[in-house]
Image (cartoon, rainbow, N blue to C red):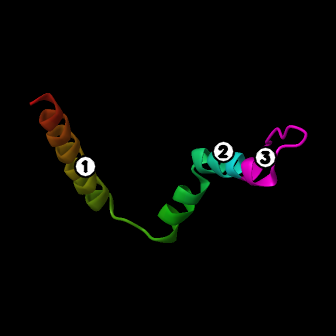
Amino acid sequence: MLIVQVKEGEPIEKALKKFKKKFEKTGVVKELRNRQKFTKPSVVYREGKKKAVYVKKMYQALEA
């Protein structure tokens, strides 16, 4: 259960923004999306390698 501390006189929009940020950090929505479809382990592995290569290129571009 998420608890958001709201100060007296604080606008509801600000409290809602805090709630959304906390909720996003929990990763519930991401987990739900992942569970909607099955992905073969080989595909997950391949996507992970692609991401690693991309990140490595990004770091090399920053260093150059």
Q: Are marks 1 and 3 in contact (CB under 8 Å)?
A: no
Residue 52 % position (x, y): 22, 43
Q: Is residue 27 magenta?
A: no
Instruction: Judge by depth and name the residue closer to the eye, 43 or 28.
Output: 28
Identify the mark at residue 51; answer none if there is no mark: 1
9 sits to left or right of 4: right
Query: Which residue position holds label 2?
Result: 22
Residue 22 % position (x, y): 66, 44
Q: Residue at x 27, y 49 (%)?
A: 48
Which mark is nearer the camera, 2 or 1? 2
Query: Which residue position holds label 3?
Result: 1
Q: Residue at x 23, y 42 (%)?
A: 55
- Label 2 neighbour load within 10 Å: few <14, some 14-19, many 20+: some
Query: Counting residues from the N terminus, which is met first, the one under dot 2 or under dot 3?
Result: 3
Per the image, label 3 sits on a secondary structure element best described as loop
Please state which amino acid type lies under the numbered disc 3: Met
Per the image, label 1 sits on a secondary structure element best described as helix
Query: Counting residues from the N terminus, which is met first, the one under dot 1 or under dot 3?
Result: 3
Quadrant of the image occupied by residue 31 = bottom right
Quadrant of the image occupied by residue 58 = top left
Residue 57 % position (x, y): 14, 41
Please state which amino acid type lies under the numbered disc 2: Lys
Residue 14 % position (x, y): 73, 48
Q: Residue at x 20, y 52 (%)?
A: 50
**Residue located farthest toward the top when viewing the structure as drawn:** 63
Find the distance from the CA under tag 2 to the CA under tag 3. Answer: 11 Å
